[in-house]
Amino acid sequence: MHKNRERITLLLVLGIFAALIINLNLFSFQIDLTSTGIYTISPASKTVVAQAKEPIYLTYYLSKKLEAYYPVTQGISDFLHEYASATGGRIRVRIVDPKASGQLGDMRRLGIEGNQIQVTDQSQLTEEVVYSGIELSYLDRHEVLPVVDSLETLEYDLTSHLEKLITQKSTSVGLLIGDPSRSLDKDYKILERQLQTLGNFQQLPLDHPIPQSINALIVAGNAAIDDTTAYFIDQYLMNGGKVLMALDSVNVDISSNKPPVVLKDNPALKLIASYGVEEPQDLVLDSYNNIVQFNSQMGVVLQRYPEWPQILSQDTNPSNPVTAHFAGLSLMWPSPLTVIQKPGIKSEVLVTTSPKSWLMTKDFTIDPNEALMSSMGASVKKQKYPVVVALTGRFPSAYTAATVPKSQANADAAPFQSLSPETRLIVVGGSTWLTDLMKITQSQANALFASSAVDWLAQDDALLSIKTRSYRDHSLTRLQDNAERQAAAFSLSFVNIALIPLLVLVVGLIRFLRRRRRELKN
């Protein structure tokens, strides 16, 4: 009995000593148990920060009121300290409450955006402007993350901004809007906000040559692209430019209330065909799709919409960096793609629809009920269809010196190039997925996919590896098969309602039996 007391006393002393060491931060040891390793800093981040010759100052402006209503801010604070520690101590982190420090008036000047939330103060509901943003300072240079409200892409955002800050290099992205019914301010704000994290972002006019200073070009839609604009795109590629082309063979203009229009003899579609990707004038519908809000005679209803396929991770290419750690993608009125092998060009299918997909080949409609009915014909064949294709290699021009379009716009353009150097091209069957309609899917995955594609096009694979490992959507709504969803729901119910209480009862029974056995022995 005396020895047991000594052993217990020794263990208690050691436990207290260990707790003191931890509280004094003499040792720092953490295990990252998150599924995507959010708190594990990547080698790419360490490499970027290692280039700094002077200390980097990171100020996290966090309103005290926000901490109580938004617990993720504590996780953000923890991550920032971990990031600073893992990158060799070159980063000095400060967490500042703008109100307590008297810096509320500086927020607008710094570019930190405020958000208005409702708070309870002395039993009264009031509104208060709160802040959660980061300022980065290095030498006499500054970068800002105006709003930080998630851990999912925080490492990527920090590292990409720090790379600009330290090396003064940034990616320049150009957007060519080829749909006459769309504009940057009205339709592409989410995409613009995401691409601005890469560096310089600008909209380009249709009737001018594309500057080679642009690191990556996004062509969003093609209804308004004529032969001259197609030639400008071709020559940008021929001079080593990288392009993401999101094109429609069946154009849907929801602002006009007109039925979908087939784009015949479209110059942009002829362009990609010459490079090895054909886009038939069909729409792909999928049993795995998004829930969309529709107006009906019964009012507003939520309904599954086969014309908006939801891409599953198993239907993506795991060997390409764009889709290696797939975060999600919801397409809207997509068309299938057919790959035609061309000499000197390597093609990869990055994304397909599910095996439960079918084609709408005529009588095009956007009505959800008619779309669903189109799957019931005897001739309907359900299978996977490629919808995103990547091409790498040396591309032959779609033009010859004799077929160059004659126009005033290209009169002063650079000399005609017939063959590109080694470069990259991504083709997506459909363009609407790039618009702000993506917010209907309640996910930022579409904008992240576009950003990941731009990273790959610009050949920044290291930064891309950070972004694609972090973002995931694990919600049960992603399980669209009824049997899978019911099985998952049953499993969760069984664990919470039956298994956990049963384990508690078993542990209690074992303790009771052991205690009773000891009492009987005594």
Image (tube, grey):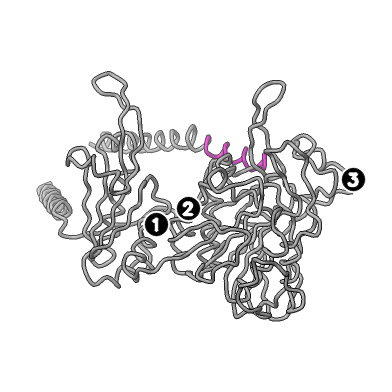
- How many discs appear? 3
Give the alpha-carbon distance from disc 1 to disc 2, as whole Å.
Answer: 10 Å
Q: Is residue 352 visible?
A: no
Q: Which is closer to the viewer, label 2 or label 3?
A: 2
Quadrant placement of the C terminus: top left
Q: Secondary structure at mark 1?
A: helix
Q: Earlier in the sequence, mark 2 or mark 3?
A: 2
User: How crowded is the residue under tag 2: few (<14 C-alpha within 10 Å), some, or many (20+)?
Assistant: some
| Magenta span | 481-493
Q: Which is closer to the viewer, label 1 or label 2?
A: 2
Task: Please name the amino acid that badge 2 sits on.
Answer: Gln
On residue 43, which mark appears? none
Left or right placement of residue 249 versus residue 71 in this view: right
Closest to the observer: 366 or 284? 366
Give the alpha-carbon distance from disc 1 to disc 3, as whole Å.
Answer: 50 Å
Query: Does the magenta-highlighted stretch encompass residue 360?
Result: no
Q: Which residue is mark 2?
A: 194
Q: Secondary structure at mark 3?
A: loop
Q: Which residue is mark 3?
A: 378
Q: Which residue is mark 1?
A: 157
Task: Please name the amino acid that badge 1 sits on.
Answer: Asp
Q: Is residue 231 visible?
A: yes
The quadrant where residue 56 appears? bottom left
User: How crowded is the residue under tag 1: few (<14 C-alpha within 10 Å), some, or many (20+)?
Assistant: some
Query: Does the magenta-highlighted stretch encompass residue 489?
Result: yes
